[in-house]
Each structure stands twice: as structure tokens, then as C-alpha cells.
Amino acid sequence: MPMVTGDTEPEQQMLVQWCMSAQVFSEPEFRQTIRRIHCIDEGKDMEEILPVVEQINGSMSAFSLELRSAMDQTSGVRMWALVNTNADPISIGATPYTASELIMLKTLVEGVFTEGSGNYSMSFHDALRLATKRGGTRAEVESLLRRFTGDGWLALDEGFVVLGARSIIELQSYFNTGFADYIRLCSLCKEMATSGVVCMECQEAVHPYCAGRVAEANGGQLSCPKCNRHIRQPWKFGPGERGVPHALESGALEAKEENVGVEEPATQSIKKLRIEDSSDEE
Amino acid sequence: MDEDTQVCERKAIDLVRYALACHASGKPLKRENLKAHVLGNTPARNTRQLLDRANELLTQNFGLKMVALPSHEKVLTAAPKAQPAPAKWVLQSTLPDAARQRLDLPQSDDDQAILGFAATVLSLVFVSNMSVSVDQLVLYVRKLGPPQCIAPVDSRGASDAHLDSAAREAIAYLTRHGYLDKVKLGASETQATQQPTDGGDHHDDGMVYTWGPKAKIEFQPLDMARFIAAATGQECTEDFLRIIGRAYGSNIASQ
């Protein structure tokens, strides 16, 4: 059992309270808060925040809490959250959601993560359809969806429901345990990728932000960080993209190459779903 | 550390985790849930020890402590009542004043609006000897205008009935969340409080609003006096505290 010994400094207590209140926050906000709490002038250099994070995690581990982060895949800004590392009856017993709301959240998170075209997203309408199958009126489900978005578990990106920063930061081990086959890691930064480009040669994925960094370093030319081949026609995945299916991934890519101009199965499935939707509404 | 001590320490840590999770969810810790999720078959004589150790861990590591929520008032009397054994707890900061101000905890616009509204309503009750009649409070809240996130109403085109209904909805919200208690006036208190003027229905006769359990925890008398001073553009001097204390019904400066 981890030992809990002695007082922590008041500044650390203040930082922990702030992290708990902010829930999910960007690294620049975190730095600003550290400066304010430690009364460090704006003009003065500040040590890297990692020692602060390590110190907090040292005292929080006994309480199954940890400061974790993930990079925003488009902007490159690092996002942080103080997460619970032990999903036992104690933490589940105090959740703000009812049992049925938790099931709804799980359904949506899993639905987005395992979505067939490998885009880690679904339209708002599809998300509503999936959620209403679990029960509740459309208005109730819509209100719940907005709540999940407000709490950071999901997010809306150009009309598509995607994983929120909190899911990406807090549910990593959950995805690793139950959905390992659906995980893509960015070849450059090694963090989970739910949007980006895939190299046709070696099927490695790269975040949009990381792809931008590689292109900038290569005079505007995007090449795969793993196999170094030039990515001429990148296969994009993410909200609103053509997608790169998880299942039979290399087979799907070969089919795409041979049949340029022919609709790929993922798009056909999505169109079929949309036709079914409009006949439902009639 | 021997096995018994280890088991106690583990339970105290679990109690801290549960308290923090409830705090994050905006829910109080309830005694029955504590038993179900954390304490289990812990004998009653050890529960006090566990609560004390959990509070020690909370204060040392988080700058927080569990405080018992006072019970709801049912009848307003001058004499203080003995509080029953606590059934609910909330977390309160143990950080000094200056530190709390430097902390500047992030709050959503809605949360800020609700807190500001609650503080303003509570300040009225505070300076009215801690009780205001139902009609007077409705009138006050109508003039103040409740936050849109609690009782949405377009005040420009709204009818009297609509504004009245929005004010009552906002007061009901504060009551549900523990900021206000609707209580019966004790016999000796009847003269001290303003009674409704004739014209309306009298089903709320003898009923007044006073501070609820959550208000008593979140707003200390001195904090409220400072809030009133800031809101009215005055300095919070000893004289000001004496005047406010007379309206509150108790000396504030000495607290």
C-alpha cells in the first residue's frame, strides 16, 4: 500500500484544488496558474512543469489520482487532466451520472472509437440514433449528449461527434484493454491518433499537427516518419474524411489504390445509413 | 505498520477518494452511502477515528476538510437548536483567505451567475434578521431578475404573472440546492418579521425564508458582511460591521 506521509506545501494543495476544479486544461493555462500560485513574475523564466507534475503525482498516487496529458492532434497544444486511475465501486458510486446515463456514455464512446470507416467519429444524427436505441426521447438524449460534451467526454467537430479530450486522456487503459485492435498511434509522437493521415506503404498513422511538423522540416514535402517514403496522396482519417477502415486495413488500402474513382465500402455503408435515416424520418 | 493499522489507513484513503469524487460531482457525502461504499461493517467506535484520519489526509494533501451540513430548519426560533448527529458532509477549503483569493478557481459563466445571485439573495435575508417573508422575497427577486440559466424569461415583454413565476422558480432552485430553507415562524418570532400586506393569497402566512444548510457552510457572516460592503461601495470598517451585525442579529466583528 502506498504510504501517505506528512503535509504537502500550501502551493501544491492550491494547484491540486485548481486542477480538480478545471477538470481538463491546456498547458499554457496550467503554466499561468503555477505562476500565479507561486507568485512568479511574467517576465521571469519558469522551470519546466514536469517537476511540478511529478511532485503532485508523487503525493496523489496513494489516492488513485494522476495528472496525465495528451496532445491536441491538430493544434499541438498539450491538454492535462487530474484523472482517477482506479474505476472501482468507490469512484463509480460518486459519479454525477445515473447508471443508465453511464451505459449511454459507454455506448457512444465505444461507438465512436470502433466506427467502421476508421474515422473515430459519427454524425450527430447517427449518435442520436445510436443513443435513442438505449431508451429515452430524442430531446432527452440530445440534452444528455450536450452534457457529455460539456463534461469533456465527447466533442463536436464540424457536426461530427468525436472523443473529447477527457476521454483521450482518461480512458487510455480502457481502450488498450478492450479495443486494442482499433488503436492507432502516431508514428512521430507515439500518442493515440484519432485523426490524421496514413502512409499507403507501411500503414503508419501521423497526427495532422505532427504531419505539419514533418512537412515543415522537409521543405513542404510530407514523408512517412517510419518508412521515409514521400506521402503523395495521403489517406486521411478523422471527422468528415474518407476514412481508413481498421479491419483488413492493408487490403482496404490496396483496393483504394486499384479503384480510384470507385466508391469504397466505407462510403457506401455511410450512404446506405443516410438513405435508411431519411426513410425513417418519412 | 501492523495489519489492523494498514486496514484502517486503507479505509481512510478510500474515504478520501469517495469524498473527492462526491465533491467533483457536486453531491454531498451521505452517511448511508459512506456505509455502503467505504465503511462497510466498520464498528461505530472506529468510524469516528476513520473520519478524523480522512480529514487529516484531506487537509495535508488537498487543503480541504469534511464539514457536516447542518440539518434543514423547520421552525425559526431565536434559541439555537442542538444539531443531531451529522447525516451529510461537504468539503470545505482549509486554505487561508489570501491563498483562496490567489487561487481564483475556474468557474463557468452559469456557475458564476448562480453564485452571485445566491449571494445577493442571502445578503437580503442576512440583513433582515435572517428571515424574509415569502412575498417580500418574491418581490425582491423579481426586481433583481434571476439568472437566465435558472429561470429563463424575456423581461422586456414578459407579463406580471410570468415574472412572478420566474422569481418563484429561482427561489425554489435556491431552496432545492440548500441555499434557502422555507420555515414556519416560531411564536416568538412572529412580530419580528415583516408580514405580507393584504392583496395576495395567504397560504404562505407564517412561512418565511432563512438560510439553508449550504448557505451556512459556504458563506460565513464576516464574508457576507464584506460582500455587502463591496456591493454597496462601502468600506468594511468596524463601524460597518457593527451596523451589519445589528441587522443580522449577532455581533460579527468578534467572530
Image: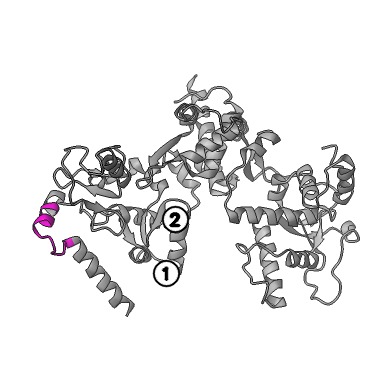
Q: Which span is picked out in magenta? A: A253-265
Q: Pick whichever, A162 or B254, lies toward us.
A: A162
Q: Secondary structure at mark 2?
A: helix
How many labels, in total? Answer: 2
Point out the frontmost of discs 1 and 2.
2
Which tag, 1 or 2, sits closer to the chain's start? 1
Q: Is residue A8 left or right of residue B98?
A: left
Q: Position of residue A75 (x, y in %)?
A: 38, 46
For the C terminus of chain B, give its image quadrant: top right
Residue B239 picture quarter: top right
Chain letter of disc 2 in the image: A
Q: Is residue A261 left or right of residue A151?
A: left
**Residue B9 in view, yes or no:** yes
Label 1 Cα crowd, 10 Å radius (few <14 / some 14-19 / many 20+):
few
Residue in the image at 46% along x and 28% along y: A48
Q: Does residue A260 belong to the magenta stretch? A: yes
Residue in the image at 25% along x and 68% along y: A273
Q: Secondary structure at mark 1?
A: helix
Farthest bottom residue? A282
Q: Name the residue tied to disc 2.
A: A149
Q: Position of residue B44 (x, y in %)?
A: 60, 35
- For residue A194, which numbered disc appears in the image? none
Chain letter of disc 1 in the image: A
Q: Name the residue tied to disc 1.
A: A138
